[in-house]
Image (cartoon, coloured by chain):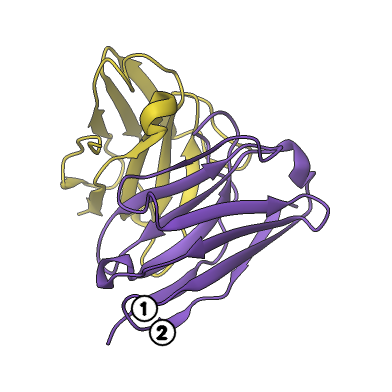
Amino acid sequence: QSALTQPPSASGSPGQSVTISCTGTSADVGLYNDVSWYQQHPGKAPKLLIYEVFRRPSGVPDHFSGSKSGNTASLTVSGLQAEDEADYYCSSYAGTNDYVFFGGGTKLTVL
Amino acid sequence: QAQLVESGGGVVQPGRSLTLSCVASGFNFRYYGMHWVRQAPGKGLEWVAVIWYDGTYKHYGDSVKGRFTISRDNSKNTLSLEMNNLRVEDTAVYYCVREKSRGAGFDPWGQGTQVTVSS
């Protein structure tokens, strides 16, 4: 089993845009559109931000967006706000042999 | 709205067993695949296990295969995780989650239950 690869950290100033990448393989991210993104604030449970690559659950602000190209998925946070400072995790369905992989997480800092 | 409440965590010695429970409310539990996800202290998320909506398929992460058993009782809206031969590295917060689609879109998340394996 291999985790998906995310950068350990990312940062941006308020109002800027930041993109976090999530790299897998042709057997997970590249093959399936079951890619999700989660936000986790310290001491809290994770919260679903994006599912099926780009879909947002109701209640998630539209300054969060998702995309995918080949084996890499991306989360873009536009118009950074102080409350966006958190850890972000990607995940992907990986077929019935491995089922689910998570990325190692990216700590987003709002400068 | 949909809600998941985990329980059953605690402090246990290596080699012992523990069973976690998760009670679902606010949605039709019997129609959804369910998972356990854990997070060790200061670490990232790790997928643990899945069970299909009708209980006919189960799958486990490599680190728990052969030691953990996931099960469900659709009549009681309850998901369980039986953990045997616990190791120090199983120490984590364990979350019960519902999937929106296969292996993805985990929502909602419960508050989690802490499992500490220590001698």
Across and down, in percent, residue B67 comes to: 40, 58
Location of mark 1 (residue) = B116
Residue A74 found in image quarter: top left
Instruction: Give the mark, 2 or 1, whose residue is nearer the N terminus.
Output: 2
Residue, far bottom? B119
Residue A105: image location, x then y, percent: 26, 47
Q: What is the drawing colour of chain B?
A: purple
How far from the left and from the top, in percent, is residue B11?
A: 41, 84
Query: Label 2 is found on which chain of the structure?
Result: B
Q: Is mark 2 on a helix, strand or loop?
A: strand
Q: Are marks 2 and 1 on the same chain?
A: yes
Q: Do the residues labelled 2 and 1 touch (CB within 8 Å)?
A: yes
Q: Name the residue under label 2.
A: B11
Helix or strand or loop: what does disc 1 sit on? strand
Taking the image as shown, residue A67 lies to the left or right of residue B82, namely left
Viewer-side residue, A25 vs A62: A25
Identify the amino acid type marked 2.
Answer: Val
Judge by depth and name the residue closer to the eye, B15 or A10.
B15
Q: Distance between the residues labelled 2 and 1?
A: 5 Å
> Chain A drawn in what color?
yellow
**Whether residue A79 can be seen here:** no
Task: Kindly identify which chain the residue marked by label 1 belongs to.
Answer: B
Is residue B118 among what the camera can see?
yes
Label 1 Cα crowd, 10 Å radius (few <14 / some 14-19 / many 20+): many
Relative to A67, residue A83 above or below: below
Q: Residue at x 33, y 31 (%)?
A: A76
Residue A13 - label: none
